[in-house]
Amino acid sequence: MALKNIIEDLVSKELENAYNNFPEACRCQQCRSDVTAIVLNQLPPQYVNGKRMSESSRHSLTYKYTSLIPSVMLKAIAKVKEHPRQECERIKNNLYRDASSILAFYRP
């Protein structure tokens, strides 16, 4: 039996479109994963059985949730942007840049 949460597919497809509205948001793998997790936790899962689900039923679920995902995703991107984790590539790069500028200041 092949169960699939079609909300995951819809979120994956919408992620790039949402990032176009937030060009300053970090797109590293950690931040993408955090955004995806936040969105998936706020939407109800919609599992389908790939072999038994009719195309019309799959289409109606897609239509229903496609309108909800963008607003939830934009809020999730803003939240991750405001509170990035230490694993975020931008955080790592900024810490490295700050450390090198401090070292350069103290070099003879």
Image (cartoon, grey):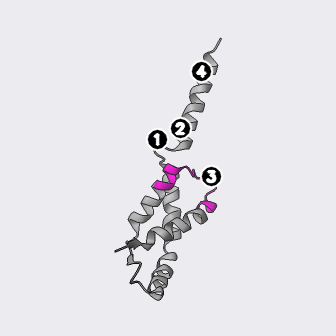
Q: Secondary structure at mark 4?
A: helix
Look at the numbered disc 2 and give the secondary structure of its residue. Answer: helix
The residue carrying mark 4 is 103
For the residue pair 4 and 82, the one nearer the viewer reads as 4
Q: Are marks 2 and 1 in contact (CB under 8 Å)?
A: yes
What is the magenta range? 19-33
Mark 2 Cα-neighbour bin, 10 Å: few <14, some 14–19, many ≥20: few
The mark that comes first in sequence, 3 or 4, is 3
- Against 108, residue 98 (above or below) is below
Residue 13 location, quadrant: bottom right
Q: Nearer the viewer, residue 70 or 55?
A: 55
- In front: mark 3 or mark 1? 1
* Residue plotted at (52% across, 58% down): 77
Q: Is residue 31 magenta?
A: yes
User: Residue 61's mark?
Assistant: none
Q: Residues within 10 Å of mark 1 (few under 14, many from 20)?
A: few
